[in-house]
Amino acid sequence: MKVLLLTGLGALLFAFYWNDNFDPASLQGARVLLTGASAGVGEELAYHYARLGSHLVLTAHTEALLQKVVGNCRKLGAPKVFYIAADMASPEVPGRVVQFALDKLGGLDYLVLNHLGATPAGTRARSAQATRWLVQVNFLSYVQLTSLALPSLTDNKGSLVVVFSLLGPVPASFSSPYSAAKFALDGFFISLRRELDVQDVNVAVTVCVLGLRDRASAAEGVRGVTRAREAPGPKAALAVIRGGATRAPGVFYPRRLHLLCLLRGWLPHSRAWFIRQELNVTAAAAA
Ligand SMILES: NC(=O)c1ccc[n+]([C@@H]2O[C@H](COP(=O)([O-])OP(=O)(O)OC[C@H]3O[C@@H](n4cnc5c(N)ncnc54)[C@H](OP(=O)(O)O)[C@@H]3O)[C@@H](O)[C@H]2O)c1
């Protein structure tokens, strides 16, 4: 009986984690609008999509960085790549970005939301003004982009892919405004998935929880503050792409983050203890 149970559990885990039916050819010619594409996770996502033959509209804040990424995407084989430099802190910008993508690509199969603004006052600033700015860039602009792209995604049975952070479902210390925006994203997109489902709208919503990655501004920002291990960037980006292409509801990279998310709300004292072990409190408070 025990052996049967363990075998069944093993098969379930295998089906959940490894048997994702990813077909790289499904992304050939797919029309993708990708935000935050000039650096970090977004830059790596752009290179993967380019290699897989997707048609891309890339957006981020800094034009020079975007031009470099566009050049690299062309070298990697992307058949069509366009870019639009835009600051998501301005509420009228998401509309311009979606319209640009629809004009250039003629429709959308994927909206990949990944951009991340760090407040001009610093990532741990808690003032109302800094938080308002952060909520516009890291939450409201996601909502605007989604609402504007949804009609085209619906027509094309497309996908919404949201790059997310462990600091949404599992808040840590010294990240309250950042965690608040990520929490809001979690609520919005999980509710939206249910709403689409009950209306029989065939648009997938894939929420991707990533841990710390190397070579990223986020990792730089917490260096010396957290002892959390950094995960390799290109592999994290590939996990996001596979999850989006297979219409998975959730992606966890590294996979152990899934357990942490499942345990949220449970064992709060031991969770606080674990977070404390990963944190250099003196450095974090001084930052
Ligand atoms: N890095 C990590 O360790 C980590 C861990 C977990 C989750 N994540 C998630 O992964 C995603 C990407 O993070 P990342 O670390 O790759 O970030 P990153 O390296 O700092 O890149 C952020 C991207 O967002 C763009 N951006 C910043 N402010 C913007 C604005 N006001 N308007 C438009 N675009 C703006 C940047 O453009 P410019 O360069 O032009 O400013 C850049 O392309 C985020 O959603 C984050 O929560 C990252």
Image (cartoon, grey):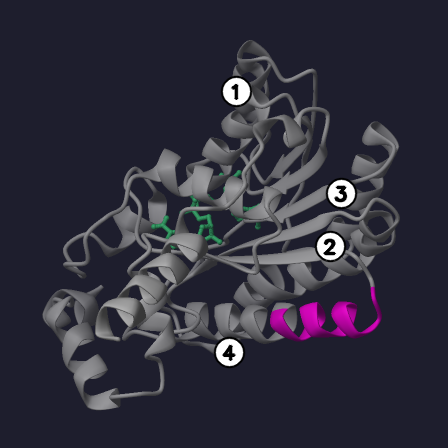
Secondary structure at badge 3 equals helix
Rendered residue at 58%/23% (across/down): 52
Residue 244 is situated, as x and y percent measured from the top left of the image, at 59, 46
Instruction: Judge whether 164 appears above or below 198 on screen.
Output: above
Secondary structure at badge 2 equals helix
- Marks 3,4: beta carbons within 8 A: no
Locate the C terminus by quadrant.
bottom left
Q: On the image, numbered disc 1 is attached to which residue?
A: 68
Locate the N terminus by quadrant.
bottom left
Earlier sequence position, callout 3 versus callout 4: 3
Residue 47 is situated, as x and y percent measured from the top left of the image, at 51, 26
Left or right, residue 24 beside residue 130? right
Label drawn at residue 97: 3
Task: Point out the frontmost of discs 1 and 4.
Answer: 1
- Could you give the CA–CA distance between mark 1 and mark 2, rounded to whole angstroms? 24 Å
Task: Point out the frontmost of discs 2 and 4.
Answer: 2
Indicate yes or no whether the magenta region holds residue 198: yes
- Marks 3,2: beta carbons within 8 A: yes
Task: Point out the frontmost of discs 3 and 2.
Answer: 2
